């Protein structure tokens, strides 16, 4: 049997991306469509989305639909479109008043309204199309209210009588917490459904509401599923998650190898494979030349592509990086944008080590691919990492990951053992400077042994984290929830 799945998300590659959620939304829905399911994706039509390249077809009966949010009426229009190379239904929610902003997410006082509208509009689209989803798959706080809406506002509609909800937590660090004053704008009369303690403390949390009411919860790696039930990682939601532990599963994200494989990557000047690694060297030269760093084939290049936030573990690099750069011969290529503090740190590092460090500030997909291909090592010292995609991309690109043992990093990278020759990267446990320096030094040492290094690269390149493997777990979950077996 195939399923009817409404997939509601605030990011979708290549249209709207700030991080891994976009990649996962794009690849998982493509996988599900490929498996014959009727999957329909709902995404805001952000100002940032380049409309000139899209064929936008107004959906009948879904033009200028009014939605009342606490006495203020907003209206949205739905446009159907298809992405190049995939032909599942994608519905863009047009509401310029809320989505014509310079970035996907904002700190504006109406941020909650922006995503309330997305959630309401997705459900109203199902109604307008007379389409009854068996599963509404929600993602992160931006869609966390949908399970409650289905139990309250939309309960009257038999269209949703058999609809089950899945909420995937991509990052528990973002909870969508708003002042309790927004309660009226939710449009639900039954206040008793809201988390009463939070209300007393003057707060409404979209993610928490989703955790309370979704039929099933998933997160993006088995280790993170365990971690978020503990005080160190649960960000205040650990007790609630432990309560729901029998409805919580960690499903590792997959990789879309159509986008991320060095053999077919159209963004690379020199494709390569495990059998012929010569292209990798050419990409390395291109990377160094392009960034104005001196070339040197046997000088290792460490890459880092990341949102520059506390989560990514930059704190433990702060002190030791300058020392390590003085002591050891390597190049460091950093691509990222985010908190000002870290932008300044990496700018300063580049100023102090102009022949060794390049920092490219901003979001640049082409450069991200070139770094994956041209670097020898990839650094992810994350404080926490729900899944992480870059370490899996790195493995496929023969770029040996140096990671902290947390979340999805722990599930995908195993410590290299020079004696036995097994493992695929450099893994450290403790969140401190000594540990990350130990791992980086170990990697730089092994790099000197060209034969061992090449073997290590090849063992990573042979691993398969494709959606063909991971996607089936979501299908099994939908089957369990709906009682309909997967065909
Ligand atoms: P997160 O979702 O926490 O940001 P992931 O590792 O799951 O981390 O996914 C990050 C994704 O975003 C990867 O595809 C990565 O290449 C991409 N990315 C992050 N920062 C940048 C940037 N500055 N430029 C281009 N791509 C970036």
Image: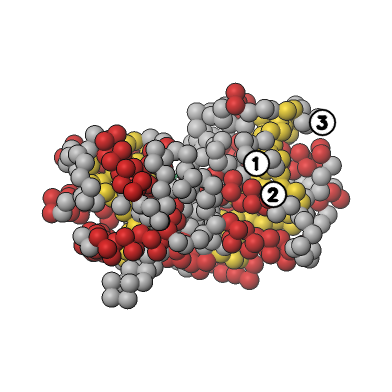
**Which label is found at residue 86?**
1
Q: Quadrant of the rendered structure where residue 241 is?
A: bottom right
Labels 1 and 2 touching (C-beta < 8 A): yes
Mark toward the start of the polypeptide (1 vs 3) = 3
Q: Which residue: 65% across, 41% down?
A: 86
Examine the rendering and report whether any part of residue 449 can be seen: yes
* Location of ligand 1 given as a quarter of the image: top left
Q: CA distance from mark 1 to mark 2?
A: 9 Å
- Identify the residue under disc 2: 33
Where residue 327 appears, as percent x and y from the top left, is 13, 54
**Which coloring applies here?**
secondary structure
Where residue 106 appears, as percent x and y from the top left, is 50, 35
Categorize mark 2 by other alpha carbons within 10 Å: few (<14), some (14-19), many (20+): many
**Label 1: which secondary element:** loop
Whether residue 345 sits left or right of residue 202 in the image: it is left
Of badges 1 and 3, the one in the foreground is 1
Where residue 219 appears, as percent x and y from the top left, is 56, 60
Disc 1, ligand 1: is the CB inside 8 Å?
no
Q: Which residue: 54% across, 47% down?
A: 258
Q: Which residue: 73% across, 28% down?
A: 57
Q: CA distance from mark 3 to mark 2?
A: 25 Å
**Label 3: which secondary element:** loop
Query: Which residue sits furthest right?
Result: 158
Query: Which residue sits furthest top?
Result: 52
**Which label is found at residue 61?**
3
Mark toward the start of the polypeptide (1 vs 2) = 2
State the residue in front, 486 or 449. 449
Where residue 85 appears, as percent x and y from the top left, is 62, 39
């Amino acid at each position: 049997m195939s399923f009817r799945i409404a997939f509601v998300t605030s990011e979708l590659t290549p249209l709207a991306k700030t991080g891994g959620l976009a990649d996962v939304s794009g690849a998982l829905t493509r996988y599900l469509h490929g498996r014959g399911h009727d999957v329909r994706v709902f995404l805001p039509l952000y100002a940032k989305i380049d409309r000139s390249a899209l064929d936008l077809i107004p959906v009948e009966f879904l033009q200028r639909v009014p939605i009342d949010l606490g006495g203020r009426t907003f209206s949205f229009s739905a446009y159907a479109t298809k992405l190049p190379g995939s032909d599942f239904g994608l519905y863009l929610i047009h509401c310029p008043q809320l989505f014509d902003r310079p970035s996907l997410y904002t700190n504006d006082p109406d941020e909650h309204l922006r995503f309330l509208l997305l959630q309401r509009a997705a459900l109203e689209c199902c109604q307008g199309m007379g389409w009854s989803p068996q599963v509404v798959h929600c993602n992160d706080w931006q869609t966390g209210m949908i399970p409650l809406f289905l139990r309250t506002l939309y309960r009257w509609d038999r269209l949703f009588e058999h609809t089950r909800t899945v909420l995937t937590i991509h990052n528990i660090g973002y909870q969508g917490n708003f002042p309790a004053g927004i309660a009226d704008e939710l449009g639900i009369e039954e206040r008793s459904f809201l988390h009463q303690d939070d209300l007393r403390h003057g707060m409404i949390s979209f993610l928490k509401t989703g955790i309370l009411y979704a039929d099933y919860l998933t997160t993006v790696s088995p280790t993170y599923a365990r971690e978020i039930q503990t005080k160190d990682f649960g960000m205040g939601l650990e007790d609630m998650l432990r309560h729901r532990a029998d409805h919580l599963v960690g499903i590792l994200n997959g990789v879309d190898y159509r986008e991320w494989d060095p053999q077919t990557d159209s963004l690379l000047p020199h494709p390569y494979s495990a059998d012929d690694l010569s292209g990798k060297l050419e990409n390395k030269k291109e990377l160094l030349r392009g960034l104005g760093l001196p070339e040197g084939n046997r000088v290792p290049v460490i890459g880092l592509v990341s949102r520059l936030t506390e989560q990514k573990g930059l704190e433990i690099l702060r002190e030791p990086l300058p020392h390590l750069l003085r002591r050891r011969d390597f190049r460091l290529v950093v691509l990222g944008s985010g908190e000002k503090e870290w932008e300044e740190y990496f700018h300063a590092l580049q100023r102090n080590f102009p022949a060794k460090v390049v920092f490219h500030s901003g979001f640049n997909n082409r450069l991200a691919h070139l770094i994956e291909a041209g670097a020898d090592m990839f650094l992810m010292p994350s404080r926490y990492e729900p899944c992480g995609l870059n370490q899996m991309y790195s493995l496929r690109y023969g770029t040996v990951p140096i990671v902290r043992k947390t979340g999805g990093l722990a599930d995908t990278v195993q410590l290299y053992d020079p004696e036995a020759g097994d493992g695929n990267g450099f893994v450290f446990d403790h969140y401190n400077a000594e540990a990350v320096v130990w791992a980086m030094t170990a990697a730089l040492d092994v790099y000197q042994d060209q034969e061992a290094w090449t073997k290590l690269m090849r063992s990573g390149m042979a691993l398969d984290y494709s959606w063909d493997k991971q996607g089936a777990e979501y299908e099994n979950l939908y089957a369990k929830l709906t009682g309909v077996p997967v065909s």
